[in-house]
Amino acid sequence: MAYNQLKTGAVLNYIILGLNAITGLVYTPFMLRMMGQSEYGIYALASSVIAYLSILDFGFGNAIIRYTAKYRADGKLNEQYSLFGLFTILYSLIGLICLVAGVIVVCNVDLIFGTTMSIIELKRTKIVLMLMVLNLGFSFPLSIWGGIITAYEEFVFLRVLQIFRIILSTIVMIALLYVGYKAIAMVVVSTIFNFFILGLNYIYAKNRISVKVSFKNLDWSLLKSISIYSFWIFLNIIMDRIYWSTGQFVLGAVSGTAAVAVFAVAITFVGIYMSYSTAISGVFLPRLTAIVCKPDCEKEVSDTFIRIGRIQFIPMSLILSGFIVFGHQFIMFWAGKEYEETFYITLLLFCVLFIPLIQNIGITVLQARNQMKFRSIVYFINAVASLLFQIPLAKFYGGIGCAIAISVALIIGQI
């Protein structure tokens, strides 16, 4: 049963990626034209700021999956329920911190972006940001249920729910854009769907898996072990945010919303590219955690690494070669001439990411073994160096400058 969930979950991941590609081909160019560069730039900029606030997860999302899977492998049921109570308290505090931090950011929008945005753009940015902050802050306490379902390897439910969300939310947003609504309406719709999905996760975990949350006999000593594990995951999350969200922020401060829009479209393509690699590796953390708990597991771990790496190589090489041949014409037709620079930014990042993405099951192995320390430190230093170089390069070369800084850091750190 668990193997079927794993295999079906991986297949559904690719279906989701295909749906994202199809809806993106139809929806994204429509959205760009209906919103305009300024409005889309506001939406992308606000999203990048929220991406930074989302790191307040502190890596606990992975910890829920790992420690739940470990307790399941050891047959410790009551300890699981106390663990869920502990995470509920932690995430409620994180949600409160997120709300406070978000309000501070909203209050300082004029100070940060006042030199590159008009008064109307600043006002709309504040509204969009505030809505996103509320969405994120109240989502944290409810997010544990998705992690629990993942740890129980109930991938089919999660992926079917995601398919439903992609299709329905895209239809609703196209309708809203068609009648004239823009960034604010998109954020409101996204928030509604988000809480609907979180609620269904809660119902499924309580009724299908029979999960209980206990606030009795909380093992606070476990918090130290969880915090050490999560800290190195947290550094890795910060690294990702610096690589993939800082460019929009920097360009918003030095170049304006049009440059943000061009770079944001490139980052959207990069996100899709990376997701084809993680479609398989993303479902293996519970399984690998159970494997590394066994004695003499080295060969099984190594065989898994090699097998998954070979599978990942196939879609990544096809996507890269296809983009090299057809990418420029596609972007010119799909997004318009004003987005031509998107092709060069995307191609540069695609080439640099190719080698790390066919081997990223290794990251899951390190998470399962609780051995993320060295990787996180090295990559975090590279990410910070990337940010420092993005600022001056963005002033002179715009989005291309940001992409060069990111690429050099990725080559040094991951290749």
Image (cartoon, rainbow, N blue to C red):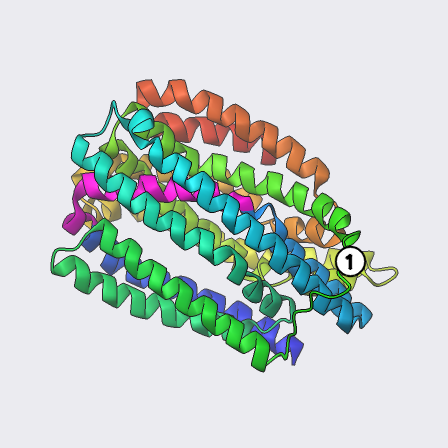
Q: Position of residue 73 (x, y in %)?
A: 78, 69
Q: Does the magenta stretch include residue 233?
A: no
> In the image, what residue occupies the spot 80% across and 51% down?
221
Give whichever of 82, 255 is nearer the camera: 82
Residue 398 seen in render: no
Residue 170 seen in render: yes
- Residue most extreme to the front: 216
Q: Position of residue 337 (x, y in %)?
A: 17, 39
Q: Where is residue 195 in the image (x, y as percent from the top left)?
A: 41, 65
Left or right position of 406 against 294: left
Left or right position of 90 against 201: right
Q: Where is residue 260 in the image (x, y as percent from the top left)?
A: 29, 35
> In the image, what residue occupies the spot 25% across and 49% down?
330
Residue at which label 1 appears: 219
* Quarter the C terminus occupies: top right
The mark total stands at 1
Look at the image and give the residue range highlighted in magenta: 32-56
Q: What residue type is labelled 1?
A: Asp
Q: How would you rate the neighbour count of disc 1 (Cα within 10 Å): few for under 14, some for 14-19, many for 20 or more?
A: few
